[in-house]
Amino acid sequence: MAINTKVRSKDEEIMDDFALEGEELRDALDKIASINQFLGGNKVTLAGVEKLVGKNNKQPIKIIDVGCGNGDMLRALANYAKKKNLDFELVGIDANSFTVAHAESLSKDFKNISYQCKDVFNHLENPISCDIVLLTLTLHHFVDEDIVKLLAYYKGSARMGLVVNDLQRSATAYRLFTALCYVFALNRMSKQDGLTSILRGFKREDLQRYSKKLQLKKITINWKWAFRYQWIINTAKV
C-alpha cells in the first residue's frame, strides 16, 4: 500500500479529545513514554536543553513542558538536574485533567515538578515567564496556523529558548511503527494515534517555513533517530 506523506494529514487523533479518560488512555500514555525512551527520544530533548543551558549560571532554571503527557520527560529532566547539580523548576502543562492526574501520581516523589491542566490556546493573551519551553511530540497535534501562534507566544516567553522534538513524516517511519505495534503490544488507541501522528509529522521544509514566518534568527534543525527532528530555537538576547 502506497503511503502519501507529501502533505501533513488533517486526521484527528483519539487522544486529542481532552475529555478522554480511563485505562486505555493511561496505557497509551505510558506506552508512548516507553517507546520514546526505547527509541532515544528523551535524549533528543535532553541534548537540546543542555545546549540552551550551556554554561549559564542562572539558577533556578524554569522549564515548561507543553503537552507533557505522563510527565516522563520532566522526570528525566529532574534526574538529569540532580546528576549535574542544577536547580530546575519543572512545570508540565496538559489540557486533559485525567492525564495531569496520572502525571502527578507518577511524579509524587519529585519536589521540583508541578503540573497545570489547561488548554494553552485559551491563554495566549496571558504573559508568562520562563527560561526554556519544551514541545516533545506535541506540535504535530496542531494545524500549521496554530503551530505558528503557539511558537510566537512561547518565543516571547522563554528567555533561553525552545526545544521541539517531533516526528518526521515518512513512509519508512510509518512501516516501522506498524512493526513496533506488535513488539510493544500496543492497544487500539496507541496503534491508531501513532500512525496518525506520523502522517501529521513534519518534513524539514515545514520547520524551515515556520521559522521564516516567525522570523527566527538562531535555530538549528537536525534529523535524529528514530525518524524525528530536533528543532532548537535560541531566544537569548546575547
Image (cartoon, rainbow, N blue to C red):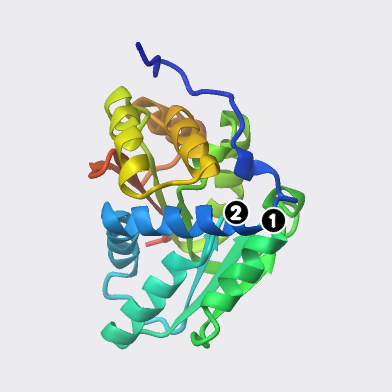
Q: Amino acid at mark 2?
A: Leu
Residue closer to the observer: 87 or 97: 97
Marks 1 & 2, CB-CB < 8 Å contact: yes
Q: Where is 138 relative to 175, above or below?
A: below
Residue found at the far top of this picture: 2
**Label 1 belongs to which residue?**
21
**Quarter that holds the N terminus:** top left
Q: Residues within 10 Å of mark 1 (few under 14, many from 20)?
A: some
Q: Quadrant of residue 55?
A: bottom left
| Horizontal and vertical percent position of residue 196 | 49, 31
Q: Is residue 127 visible?
A: no
**Image point (35%, 29%), residue name:** 174
Taking the image as shown, residue 74 lies to the left or right of residue 144, namely left
Image side of residue 75 versus residue 177, left or right: right
Left or right, 20 with reference to 160: right
- Residue highlighted by disc 2: 25
